Amino acid sequence: MSTRESNPRQIDASRSDETRDGAMTRRNHDAPSQALNMAGKGGRKSTSPDGPGTGTAVITRTKTQTQRPSMYRVLLLNDDYTPMDFVIGVLCTFFHKDFDDANRIMWQVHNNGVGECGVYTYEVADTKVTQVMDHARKHQHPLQCVMEKK
Ligand code: TYC
């Protein structure tokens, strides 16, 4: 997943030459302001290029868009050698299932070849796959754990 998440789109009204009542003004946004030019030359110092009290304002509207992250299923695959109790232990330890859910998922995998342990964001799913695979290897069981994008 492109990490992807916030993609703020900014609508910046400061570049518009249209005044509030819809009239067009000619103003070069990139040129030094009159106020700046006049400063230090003995000219009138002003807070605005149009002079005081003209009410020049910049209105900025920011639209924030959030995107939900892609989700990934973590799956256990069946094999003929990993003990059932070991699989139930994996589901309880790494996927926080209670015994009944773990037992149900284990039988689902045993009977159908594959079963879902949980659905997570990419990094969490990837971590769980690594944890389960390391645990199985450490105990010399051929249990396979994989992830797939939803
Ligand atoms: N089929 C295994 C057995 O009969 C049990 C098992 C269940 C293995 C689920 C892996 O992901 C698995 N001992």
Image (cartoon, rainbow, N blue to C red):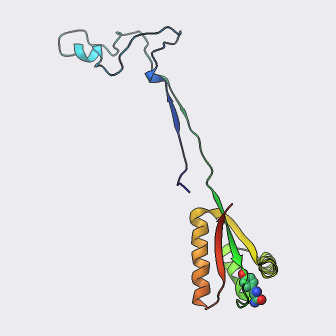
Front residue (pair 119, 79): 79
Front residue (pair 46, 37): 37
Q: Is residue 97 left or right of residue 132?
A: right
Front residue (pair 32, 50): 32
Position of 71 relative to 54 (above/below): below
Q: Residue at x 73, y 89 (%)?
A: 80
Q: Residue at x 61, y 91 (%)?
A: 139
Q: Quadrant of ligand 1?
A: bottom right
Q: Residue at x 64, y 73 (%)?
A: 146
Residue 9 in view: yes
Q: Residue 50 at what x, y percent from top left?
A: 36, 10
Q: Residue 46 at what x, y percent from top left?
A: 30, 13
Q: Quadrant of the N terminus?
A: bottom right
Position of 67 relative to 61 (above/below): below
Q: Residue furthest left?
A: 41
Front residue (pair 150, 25): 150
Q: Is residue 64 left or right of residue 72?
A: left
Q: Quadrant of the C terminus?
A: bottom right
Which quadrant of the structure image shows residue 52?
Answer: top left
Q: Residue at x 53, y 10 (%)?
A: 22
Which quadrant of the structure image shows residue 90?
Answer: bottom right
Residue 88 in view: no
